[in-house]
C-alpha cells in the first residue's frame, strides 16, 4: 500500500468531513521556500510561523478547513516538491 493510500485510509477512518485540519512543515529559513509552503493554502487558512533557536529553520503550522482526504493529500504532494522540506 502506498503512503498516500495509507494516509487516505487513516484520514477517512478518523475524520468526518468537512473538518479543520492542521498541517505542520519545517523548512529552511529561505523566503522563497516559506512563500511556496504558504501558497499551498487558501487565504482563509490560519498560518503560524516559528523560527528555530539558531534561525536556520522555520516551522510552519497551517489550519485550514478541508472537504475530504484528497485535498489533504494534494497539499502534501505539492509540499513534497519543495527541496529540504519536512512534513510532520
Image (tube, helix red, strand yellow):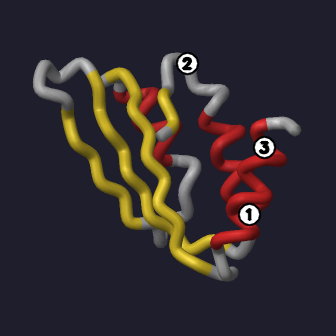
Q: Is residue 64 left or right of residue 30?
A: right
Q: Residue 58, relative to residue 55: is it above or below?
A: below
* Secondary structure of the residue carrying numbered label 3: helix
The alpha-carbon separation of the residues under discs 2 and 1 comes to 24 Å
Q: Is residue 25 left or right of residue 59?
A: right
Q: Quadrant of residue 42?
A: bottom right
* Secondary structure of the residue carrying numbered label 1: helix
Residue at the far right in the pictured view: 1
Other-residue count near label 2 (Cα within 10 Å), few / some / many at <14 / 14–19 / ≥20: few
The image's mark for residue 83 is 2
In the depicted view, which residue is nearer to us: 12 or 47?
Answer: 12
Q: Residue 12, relative to residue 39: is it above or below?
A: below
Q: Is residue 84 left or right of residue 40?
A: left
Who's the residue at 30% across and 54% down the image? 48
Disc 3: which residue:
4
Q: Quadrant of the N terminus?
A: top right
Amino acid at each position: 500500500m502506498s503512503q498516500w493510500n495509507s494516509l487516505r485510509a487513516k484520514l477517512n477512518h478518523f475524520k468526518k468531513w468537512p473538518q479543520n485540519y492542521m498541517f505542520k512543515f519545517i523548512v529552511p529559513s529561505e523566503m522563497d521556500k516559506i512563500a511556496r509552503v504558504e501558497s499551498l493554502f487558501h487565504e482563509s487558512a490560519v498560518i503560524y510561523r516559528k523560527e528555530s533557536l539558531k534561525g536556520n529553520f522555520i516551522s510552519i503550522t497551517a489550519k485550514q478547513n478541508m472537504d475530504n482526504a484528497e485535498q489533504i493529500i494534494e497539499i502534501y504532494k505539492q509540499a513534497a516538491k519543495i527541496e529540504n522540506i519536512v512534513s510532520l
